[in-house]
Image (cartoon, grey):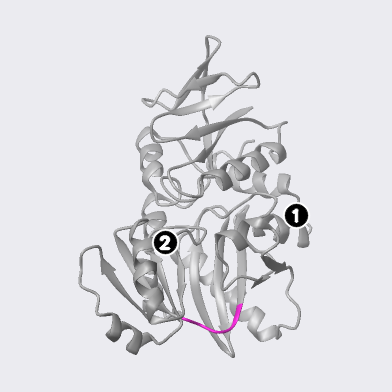
Amino acid sequence: MKNIAIICGGYSGEYQVSIESAATVRRNIDKDKYNPYIVYIEKDKWFHKDEEGIEHYVNRNDFSLLIRNMPIKFDGVFNAIHGSPGEDGKILAFFDTIGIPYTSCDMDLSALTFNKHHCNHFLASLGIKVARSVSFLKGEHIDKASVIDGLGLPLFVKPARSGSSVGVSKVKTEEDFDNALEVAINIDERIIIEEFLDGREFGCGLFMSDKELKVLPLTEIIAKNDFFDFEAKYSGSMADEITPPGKLKSDAEIDIKATSAMIYRKLGCKGIIRIDYMLTGTDLYLIEINTVPGLSPASIIPKQAEAMGISLKELFSAVIRPMFRDGNP
């Protein structure tokens, strides 16, 4: 039996969503093969909470626990932290240092994909379409009139490093611009100002199963808010998520799935990822890559797996197995 730490929490506005994802993993992990321990990662403490609610603190020298005088050493880590430090690569560098394998993309790739500014430039070099944008660091002068003239209205203002649309604003008028900048800069010191793309939004989930790349059914996201913001993603009532989508031409579906598979392989992704797109007419634009997508009951990946006839037990086993080089369990 392998001991698996399911890490969750983190330092961002996605804390609660991460905890719900971890609970989903624990409920569905194959307990005939794995002993799961949910480990909460917070800025001032890392800990496991037992069934009696007692907190057992992690030894950060080797990422182990001591529960009732019994040492627990972990064979692997299931990364369920959305945002920092799980999705930006920071805690992954720690696991690399102490030699504990994990389920998600590695430190370098996580850092790249979490920074939308750098990631979009890299993807554009591969010939993938991304929205036109400009980027600024905190304190830089922003010529509002020039930006609006170049990108038009409406437009989006985003933190460069954030997930679940935290800190993202849709700017419809010039009067909305300054407040949107303030919201974004409170999340990250670099912001992105991006053109608005009018089209249909899709999410494509992928994971590697025994050296075979599995592309899950697409989900169309129809937000009832101005865009697919945090509330729409997790309230369950502010967006329709249709899996698989209706009235989508087969060539568009093939394009989305083929592009996603190419990105997964080209970047050397690991585990479960989700890539979001905007389809405007016949043009496909990549919105973002999620290297630690949500796994809560309200999240897209579980719905896509169900549509493909893959149980969450099978899904989680598929991403855990590659951590162990001998293939066991």
User: Measured from the top left, where is residue 151 in percent x and y?
Assistant: 38, 85
Q: Residue at x 71, y 40 (%)?
A: 28
Q: Using the image as rendered, state which of residue 223 and residue 124 is in the foreground.
A: 223
Q: Quadrant of the C terminus?
A: top right
Residue under label 2: 113
Please tell me whether residue 265 belongs to the stretch shown in magenta.
no
Residue 82 lies, in percent from the top left, at: 50, 50
Q: Residue at x 42, y 43 (%)?
A: 11
Q: Is residue 206 visible?
A: no
Which residue is the site of mark 1?
310
Other-residue count near label 2 (Cα within 10 Å), few / some / many at <14 / 14–19 / ≥20:
many
The kind of residue tagged 1 is Ile
Q: Of circles 2 and 1, which is in front?
A: 2
Q: Secondary structure at mark 2?
A: helix
How much space separates mark 2 and mark 1, taking CA atoms? 27 Å
User: Where residue 93 appears, x then y in whole percent?
Assistant: 36, 43
Label 2 is placed on what type of residue?
Thr
Depicted 154 relative to depicted 10: above or below:
below
What stretch of residues is rendered in magenta? 196-200
Secondary structure type for disc 1? loop
Instruction: Name the quarter where the N terminus is drawn.
Output: top right
Q: Which image quarter: residue 202?
A: bottom right
- Residue 297, relative to residue 191: is it above or below? above
Residue found at x 36% / y 25%: 61
Sequence-earlier tag: 2 or 1: 2
Q: Position of residue 259 (x, y in %)?
A: 54, 75
Q: Is residue 181 left or right of residue 40?
A: left
Q: Is residue 327 above or below residue 48?
A: below
Mark identifier at residue 181: none
From the viewer's perspective, tell me whether residue 284 is left or right of residue 298: left
